[in-house]
Image: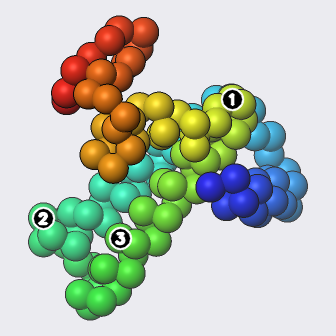
Amino acid sequence: MDRLSDDVEVVSHGYAGAHRFTRDAAWFMLKLQEEVGELTQAFLMLTGQARAKGNSPQELADRFGAELADVLCHVLLLARHHGVDLTDCVERTWLVWHPDRAISTVAEVDGQAVTGM
């Protein structure tokens, strides 16, 4: 995930420089929101809940995948901007519940001991 984050940062930094805008905390958050909106539109089109606008089923599927990638990349950028180690966060908040990784049935979530999920 770190390598992907590094590569996405290079692309985003170059894009911002080419189009002469500043990527500040608000930009990272708002850009993610914009991309989630585009993902929602692609989902609605893919599932027949919005006009396909002349796109084939394959084009709709491709667009949905592309919008998922955009959201993922902007999540990485937002985390990077705020110094959040997503790998560590995923390990602590999601993978702690993976049955192959559980050492015991007790885990800590938000500072509280929790059994099971």
Residue 42: give x, y in percent of width and height.
31, 66
Q: What residue would you read off at disc 3?
A: 64
User: Which quadrant of the structure image shows residue 23?
Assistant: top right
Q: CA distance from mark 3 to mark 1?
A: 27 Å
Q: Is residue 28 shown left or right of residue 23?
A: left
Secondary element at tag 1: loop
Secondary element at tag 3: helix
Q: Residue at left 30%, top 80%?
A: 60
Amino acid identity at mark 1: His
Q: What residue would you read off at disc 2?
A: 49
Q: Residue at left 42%, top 9%?
A: 111
Residue 80: give x, y in percent of width and height.
70, 39
Q: Quadrant of the N terminus?
A: bottom right
Closer mark to the observer between disc 2 and disc 3:
3
Q: What residue would you read off at disc 1?
A: 82
| Closer to us: 91 or 62 | 91
Q: Is residue 15 visible?
A: no
Contact check, label 3 and label 1, Cβ < 8 Å:
no
User: Which quadrant of the structure image shows residue 82?
Assistant: top right
Closer mark to the observer between disc 3 and disc 1:
1
Label 2: how many Cα within 10 Å (few below 14, some 14–19, many 20+): few
Closer mark to the observer between disc 2 and disc 1:
1
Q: Residue at left 66%, top 46%?
A: 77
Label 3: how many Cα within 10 Å (few below 14, some 14–19, many 20+): many
Amino acid identity at mark 3: Phe
Q: CA distance from mark 2 to mark 3?
A: 14 Å
Q: Quadrant of the C terminus?
A: top left
In the image, residue 56 sits, relative to residue 76, either above or below, namely below
| Closer to us: 67 or 91 | 91
Could you tell which of marks 3 and 1 lies nearer the N-terminus?
Answer: 3
Q: CA distance from mark 2 to mark 1?
A: 36 Å
